[in-house]
Image (tube, rainbow, N blue to C red):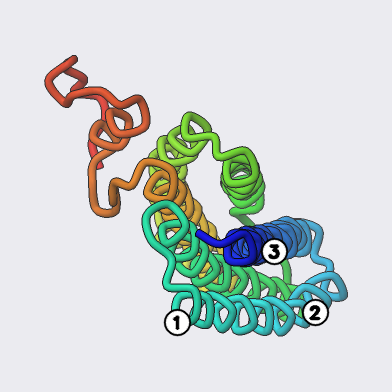
Amino acid sequence: MEPGKDNYSRHISRRFNEELEQIRTQMLAMGGVVERQVSDAVEALVTNNAELAEKSIRVDKQTNEMELTIDEQCTKMIAIRQPTASDLRLIVSISRSIHDLERMGDEASRICKHAIEIVENGTSPRGYQEVRHVGSLVSNMVKDVLTAFARSDLELAYKVAKQDKNVDQEYRTALRSLVTYMMEDPRSVSLVLNVIWVLRSLERIGDHARNLAEHLVYQVSGTDVRHTSLKELKHTVRDESPDDETDLSEGN
């Protein structure tokens, strides 16, 4: 190759790497905004803070705009750069991740709307302890999965996916308790239902956090682990054969 062409190729490669790092940084910035949204939504509900809830709802417009901007950049990079292998996986992973982040923001907004409704119509007699507990679990999942992305840490990604099972279990337990309470006191139904919808939104945010963990595993390992069990995910993360051990404690 001629010296001039060699310099040109290195320049193009450097520019491409800079563009990749830029969209990765933007995705993490969007994640930071969503992480705060989720935290504020839970805090707004358990403290009956309508002002904080309204503030968090307004932030949702920012996350929507960030999703559109990053997604457009991903599409252009694929069309113009025609990336392959790990570069392509990075772009695809980011494109998938921002959609999950946007859905998290939507669920946080729903929580805030229920919080405002509770403030306007009266405090729910039950459910705040459950919301605080599940909200804490989910907030930690969001924080950890963003840290995993920043560090390309597959073990932490697996931990997040595993934690989703705990969130699902806590959600079901809380749901049974609140439904029983409503049956015993029908007058509480309208107020407690708002709390149940909040718990449902938190459970969905946990699902999206697990999706993010799976996107990272795909990005780093090249294996698509969507719709797989925790056991299969663990083996992918640790580069083990599924026959290496028997663990019946981990299902989907």
Which is nearer the eye, 144 or 250? 144
Disc 3 marks a residue whose amino acid type is Gln
Q: Is residue 48 left or right of residue 244?
A: right
Residue 63 x, y percent position in the rendering? 68, 76
Residue 221 x, y percent position in the rendering? 37, 41
Disc 2 marks a residue whose amino acid type is Glu
| Numbered disc 2: secondary structure | helix
Which is nearer the eye, 221 or 111? 221
Category of crowding for the residue at label 2, using alpha-carbon neighbours closer than 10 angstroms: few (below 14), some (14–19), many (at least 20): some
Q: Is residue 242 left or right of residue 73?
A: left
Quadrant of the drawing holding the C terminus: top left
Residue 38 x, y percent position in the rendering? 68, 60
Please tell me which residue is depicted at 29% across the width and 53% down the height of the picture.
226
Q: Which of marks 2 and 3 is nearer the N terminus?
A: 3
Please tell me which residue is depicted at 73% across the width and 56% down the height of the picture.
39
Name the residue beneath numbered marker 2: 54
Q: To which quarter of the image does residue 7 belong?
A: bottom right
| Numbered disc 3: secondary structure | helix
Please tell me which residue is depicted at 62% across the width and 48% down the height of the picture.
146
Q: Earlier in the sequence, mark 1 or mark 3?
A: 3
Disc 1 marks a residue whose amino acid type is Ala
Q: Give the alpha-carbon distance from disc 1 to disc 3, as whole Å.
A: 17 Å
Name the residue beneath numbered marker 3: 22
Residue 126 x, y percent position in the rendering? 61, 54
| Numbered disc 1: secondary structure | helix
Q: Residue furthest front?
A: 2
